[in-house]
Image: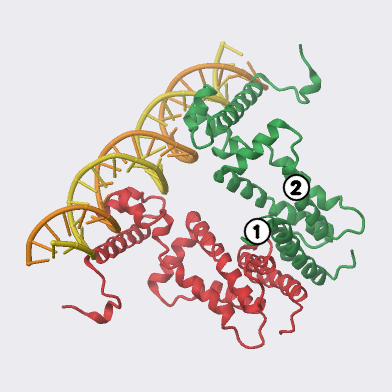
Chain colours: A green, B red, C yellow, D orange
DNA sequence: TCAATAACTGCAACGGTACAACTTTTCACT
DNA sequence: AGTGAAAAGTTGTACCGTTGCAGTTATTGA
């Protein structure tokens, strides 16, 4: 009954139980949220459904919103890779523009039934939208480091940090009259010009 | 005993009482915070000191942090004025760079004993620092509107909105190795280049 | 077998909100 | 001027998400 292929590291009983508890919490949370709505489900309900105390729940997840987002690390890796492994001849802002656009459009794809319902839940719940935004912006430091490495700038270089922040922020610049795509395009136009001048870039 | 010179608008009894309650709360909060430290003072302590219920406290102030910041509107007006009334020949990014730099340096001035202690309290309390940052970033909309008006761009123009966001964000781009002033300078260098290209600016 | 460690628990309290009262102030109408 | 109803300010209670703390239980490795 042991299937080594699904368990890359042989976990002890303790770590297995811990992972099981965590999974039970996340599953119960998503199920209840989809069933009754985010606001109608209390943290106590979720803890009860997973048969643990609320104290334990918060040892596994830092907040109610975090019960729904179990990825984070993977997203940051993809972002860093988009810059590091960009096509030859592409400038860094161009790679970022592409990635930001793609990661926004992916939500429209209704490949998976579960995923679609998940996206709807997030978009209909202000708390979850705001939490997702903060997760996104928290990648600023890692992105700045990658940009500095790619350009040979010293680690912590302010220009790189500025570009990292601005590129991430483009995603949330939508104003009332304009649609998101052109807002992003215009913001990146501003960034690409400034960046090319600041770096003296010869790239595309 | 009536002194009309101190009361520009003749307030009714109700509004006078309301203002008094509000002031009593703000005073009690600042006094207790300075005396015992922000974390050591609970919302109930403040409400008790001002002799109102906690429910009433939150009708006057939206959060514990807000008890300390009673300005807001004035700050936004100054920011908008810095752009609208900038010296002739100055570009908008230059006016913003100047204002951001000035508003940061003003904290160093120890003109007023009370003010100095207030600044120390804010800087030593993470919650208050974060709250101040959000207050600052919330001016994005008003600033974007002003920039659009000044350049003749349509209201809600994405480029203007982007510049507004980025200019405000420069204040918080400090990374580990670098000091705040050069981080701001570098971020603005990026913005000014991008802005001039985007607008086709003939200004300084 | 035993001590160290890590997960878990219950409880009290925090900042903050919703709700249904209750009191005071205001203001239009007679 | 007097009355009465709407509007605004205040209150207590109960609850929310969240944290700290002190104590219990289960797993680990020597």
Res. D12 image quadrant: top left
Residue A46 in view here: yes
Q: Residues within 10 Å of mark 2 (few under 14, many from 20)?
A: few
User: In screen coordinates, is B92 left or right of B49?
Assistant: right
Which sits in the foreground, B37 or B14? B14
Residue A174 is tagged as 1
Q: Position of residue B144 (x, y in %)?
A: 61, 69
Give left or right: position of B126 versus A102: left
Which residue is pictured at 24% across the width and 68% down the height?
B12
Which residue does the image show at 76% across and 25% down from the upper left? A9
Task: Classify mark 1: residues with Cα within 10 Å, few (<14), some (14-19) or many (20+).
Answer: some
Relative height, residue A84 to residue A118 (above, below):
below
Q: Residue at x 56, y 63 (%)?
A: B137
First of labels 2, 1 by sequence position:
2
Q: Is residue A43 above or below residue B98?
A: above
Q: Residue at x 92, y 59 (%)?
A: A89
Q: Which mark is residue A105?
A: 2
Of residues A27 and A156, the one drawn nearer to the viewer in this rendering: A27
- The residue closer to the viewer here, A67 or B159, is B159
Which of the image's four quarters has the C terminus of chain A?
bottom right
For residue A200, above or below residue A93: below
């Amino acid at each position: 009954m042991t299937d080594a292929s699904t368990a890359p590291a042989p976990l002890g009983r303790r770590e297995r139980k811990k992972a099981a508890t965590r999974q039970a919490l996340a599953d119960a949370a998503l199920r209840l949220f989809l069933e009754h709505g985010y606001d109608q489900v209390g943290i106590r309900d979720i803890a009860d459904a997973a048969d643990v105390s609320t104290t334990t729940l918060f040892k596994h997840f830092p907040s109610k919103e975090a019960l729904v987002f179990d990825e984070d690390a993977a997203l940051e890796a993809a972002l860093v890779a988009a810059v590091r492994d960009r096509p030859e001849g592409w400038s860094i802002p161009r790679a970022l523009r592409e990635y930001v656009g793609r990661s926004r459009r992916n939500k429209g794809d209704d490949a998976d039934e579960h995923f679609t319902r998940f996206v709807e839940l997030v978009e209909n719940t202000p708390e979850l939208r705001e939490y997702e935004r903060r997760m996104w912006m928290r990648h600023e430091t890692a992105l700045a480091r990658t940009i500095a490495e790619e350009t040979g700038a010293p680690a912590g270089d302010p220009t790189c940090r500025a570009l990292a922040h601005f590129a991430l922020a483009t995603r949330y610049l939508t104003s009332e009259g304009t649609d998101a795509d052109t807002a992003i395009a215009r913001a990146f136009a501003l960034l690409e010009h400034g960046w090319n001048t600041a770096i003296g870039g010869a790239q595309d």
